[in-house]
Image (cartoon, grey):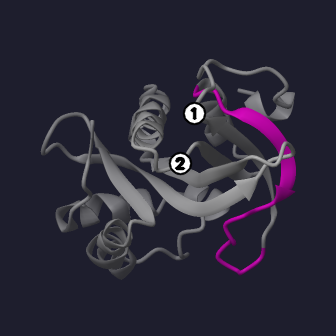
Amino acid sequence: MLDQPVPGDADGVFEYCQDPVFERFLTVPWPYRREHADGFLSEYVPSGWMSDREYTWALRDAPGADLLGVIGLRLTGDSVAADASVHRMGSIGFWLGAPHRGRGLMPEAQRLVADWAFSSGIVDVLHWECLIGNVASARTAWKSGFRFSGVGPSVAPHRDGTSPDSWQAHLAAADDRTPQPDWPAEALAR
C-alpha cells in the first residue's frame, strides 16, 4: 500500500539509506545522516505535496506498518513530440529497503502511481531513468511497461552536480503496461 511518509519513518529512511547501493546509484546525500532523513520527511515531502510539483509516497505492507521504501512523482513540465503534440511530463523515482527487494513491490507501486497520475490528468507521459548499471531499477521499469528510449545524460543531477549517463525510458497513458521489447540485454541481466 502507498501512503504519506511521516516523521516517524525517519529511522527506516536513515537505516535504508546507509546501503552502499544507494551511494552508487541514488542522488541522496552521502554519507547519509539522520538529519537528512528528518529533513526529507519534515520538509521535502510536505513541500512537494503543497506545491503540487512532487508527490512522494511510502510503501508499506499495511496501514501503520513499517516503511518498506519510497516512490515519488515529480512534475517536469511539457514536452513536444516529433508529431508536434504536447505532453505533460512527470518523472518517477523510487527506492526499496534491501530486506524488501525481490518481492515484486515496486512494479506494483509504479502501477499505482501511474494509474493515479494518468487518471487524474496530472501527466500523460512518465519518464524514468537510472544510472547505467542499476539493473534492479531497470528491470522494475521494464516489468512496469516502460519503453526504453536510450542512453543520455541524467535529467536529475547526481550529488556532485554532474549528469552522468543513464538508461532512460517512458510510459504513456495509453501504453499497455506489459514488458516491452528493445531494452538492452545488460539492463535486464540478473
Alpha-carbon neighbours of circle 1 within 10 Å: few (<14), some, or many (≥20)? some
Residue drawn at the location 46% of the way across and 31% of the way down: 111
Alpha-carbon neighbours of circle 2 within 10 Å: few (<14), some, or many (≥20)? many
Q: Position of residue 51 (x, y in %)?
A: 37, 73
Going by the numbered disc 2, the residue's amino acid type is: Val
Quarter holding residue 137: top right
Going by the numbered disc 1, the residue's amino acid type is: Ala
Which residues, given as a range, are shown in magenta?
A: 144-162
The quadrant of the rendering that contains the N terminus is: top left
Query: What is the secondary structure assignment of the residue under circle 1?
Result: loop
Residue drawn at the location 48% of the way across and 54% of the way down: 73
In this rendered view, identify the residue nearer to me: 177 or 23: 177
Q: Are marks 2 and 1 in contact (CB under 8 Å)?
A: yes
Q: Earlier in the sequence, mark 2 or mark 1?
A: 2
Above or below residue 150? Residue 177 is above
Residue 153 colored magenta?
yes
Q: How many marks?
A: 2
In this figure, which residue is indicated by the disc labeled 2? 123
In this figure, which residue is indicated by the disc labeled 1? 173
Quarter holding residue 40: bottom left
